Image (cartoon, rainbow, N blue to C red):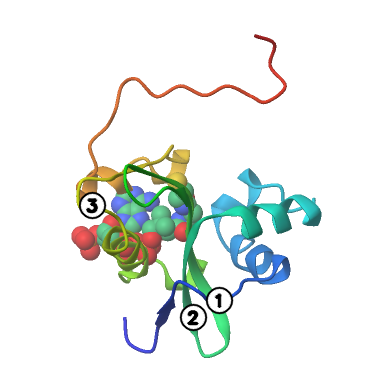
């Protein structure tokens, strides 16, 4: 899409992140009511690609990665009225470009995006597991 600039270094404030996610269905799945936690999510992400139109944040791919082996794609979001115009795909391409060629991008799809990743060429993995930080071991 024309007029969109991508960046791997432009800082994102919790307010900008929250305003973007509130235009998407991902908003209800992220702790937007806890700005301190959002600030930590943004600060401690290791590779974050952002999409901007003018001065406005319109897309984000926020990852935790070692750049060499694995890259957990924690958030992928595109502003509601700009979806399905190629921004999401380009955000993932920009992530890919910064990784070792043998590294893998890993994610857990939100229910509304289950059909998206196979369309892009992702392979489904049957052995993904999660454990809450407060769950007893
Ligand atoms: C999912 C999301 C990031 C995709 O970004 P996008 O910029 O809208 O998607 P793209 O334009 O890159 O789409 C690429 C292709 O996937 C299709 N597609 C987009 N969203 C889709 C969806 N939810 N399900 C199935 N296909 C989808 C597009 O039509 C396009 O198809 P084409 O190649 O035939 O033209 C975006 O729609 C979004 O922010 N959704 C709400 C938040 C969300 O669910 N995020 C994912 C969390 S895991």
How far apart, in angstroms, are the residues tagged by discs 1 and 3? 23 Å
How many tags in the picture? 3
Name the residue located 72 percent from the left edge and 22 percent from the top edge.
134
Name the residue located 47 percent from the left edge and 41 percent from the top edge.
110
Q: Nearer the viewer, residue 37 or 68?
A: 68
Mark 3 Cα shell of 10 Å, populated few (<14), some (14-19), many (≥20): few
How far apart, in angstroms, are the residues tagged by discs 1 and 2? 5 Å
Q: Are marks 1 and 2 in contact (CB under 8 Å)?
A: yes
Mark 3 and ligand 1: say if the CB distance to the nearest ligand atom is below 8 Å. yes
Using the image, tell me which numbered label, if any, was put on residue 57.
Answer: 1
Q: For mark 2, what is the residue?
A: 52
User: Is 119 on the left-hand or right-hand side of 81?
Assistant: left
Point out residue 72 in the picture as x, y percentages from the top left corner.
43, 44
SS at mark 1 in the image = strand
Using the image, tell me which numbered label, if any, was put on residue 120.
Answer: 3
Q: Are marks 2 and 3 in contact (CB under 8 Å)?
A: no
Mark 1 Cα shell of 10 Å, populated few (<14), some (14-19), many (≥20): many
Point out residue 12 in the picture as x, y percentages from the top left corner.
62, 71
């Amino acid at each position: 899409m024309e007029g969109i600039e991508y960046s791997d270094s432009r800082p994102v404030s919790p307010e900008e992140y929250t305003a973007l996610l509130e235009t998407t269905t991902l908003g209800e799945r992220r702790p937007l009511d806890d700005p301190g936690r959002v600030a930590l999510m943004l600060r401690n992400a290791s590779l974050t690609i952002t999409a901007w139109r003018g001065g406005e944040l319109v897309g984000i791919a926020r990852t935790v990665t070692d750049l060499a082996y694995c890259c957990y794609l924690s958030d992928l979001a595109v502003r509601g009225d700009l979806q399905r115009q190629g921004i999401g795909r380009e955000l993932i391409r920009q992530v890919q470009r910064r990784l070792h060629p043998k590294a893998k991008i890993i994610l857990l799809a939100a229910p509304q995006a289950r059909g998206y990743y196979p369309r892009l060429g992702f392979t489904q993995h049957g052995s993904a597991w999660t454990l809450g930080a407060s769950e007893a071991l």
